[in-house]
Image (cartoon, rainbow, N blue to C red):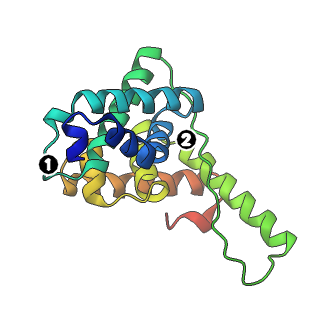
Amino acid sequence: MSRARRGDRNAFGSLVLAYQEIAYRTAYLVLGDAAEAQDAAQEGFVKAYSALGRFRVDAPFRPWLLRIVANSARNRRRTAGRRASLQLRAEAEQRPHSVPSAESGALAAEARSQLLAAVNGLSSDDRLIIGARYFLDLSEAEIATLIGSARGTVKSRLSRARARLAQQLAESGSEGWTDA
């Protein structure tokens, strides 16, 4: 990071490679469109490069970058004047101790589909906070930096978003997920 701040483009290139996937996923949570998310993530990196001089050396880089990317994505969404639906890809990380049955695989796929449909039904702010916590696996401190608020605000917003998600799931008949 210090080399990038001194103008070393290769050092910043290394940061881009290290964070491009999570930057894209963050933008995708806001936009719900792959091409737009790719553009917003790229735009975020350009803005971050321009703002390196304002980056606090004692601050963590990842939440700072993700906040810039999320803001770029929000700006793109506002400018476009549309609200795209979110198509999250939840990949089940399976470490096969045994081969799952076809029935359990089908049930798991259906449950994932119901969960993603419920997440898609949330507001963009709720999708962002749920996605940041559970799909991007960010800490409360990182989410606070991402959305520009205090940790306590993150806790309350996350709690309310989980309650709305549980309500969406209950309304769709997916009671097994109401513990969101």
Residue 108, x across and y down, in percent: 72, 65
Residue 131, x across and y down, in percent: 46, 50
- Tell whether 29 sits left or right of 61: right
Q: Is residue 48 above or below residue 146?
A: above
Crowd tier of the residue under label 1, counting other residues whose Cα lies within 10 Å: few below 14, some 14–19, many 20 or above: few
User: Which amino acid, by three-letter code, is at mark 2?
Assistant: Gly
Q: Secondary structure at mark 2?
A: loop
Most foreground residue, 111 or 134: 134
Most foreground residue, 142 or 43: 43
Q: Which residue is mark 1?
A: 57
Task: Let me know if residue 124 appears in the view.
Answer: yes
For this orientation, the residue located farthest to the right is 102
Mark toward the viewer: 2 or 1: 1
Crowd tier of the residue under label 2, counting other residues whose Cα lies within 10 Å: few below 14, some 14–19, many 20 or above: some
Using the rendered view, name the quadrant where residue 100 is placed: bottom right
Residue at (53% x, 26% y) in the render: 36
For this orientation, the residue located farthest to the bottom is 97
Residue 34, x across and y down, in percent: 58, 33
Residue at (54% x, 47% y) in the render: 119
User: Which amino acid, by three-letter code, is at mark 1?
Assistant: Val
- Tell whether 174 sits left or right of 178: right
Task: Let me know if residue 156 appears in the view.
Answer: no
Mark carried by residue 120: none
Using the rendered view, name the quadrant where residue 120 is placed: top right
Q: Which residue is mark 2?
A: 121
Most foreground residue, 76 or 180: 76
Q: Secondary structure at mark 1?
A: loop
Cα separation between marks 2 and 1: 39 Å
Which is more N-terminal, label 1 or label 2? Answer: 1
Q: Is residue 50 above or below residue 57?
A: above
Most foreground residue, 58 or 37: 58
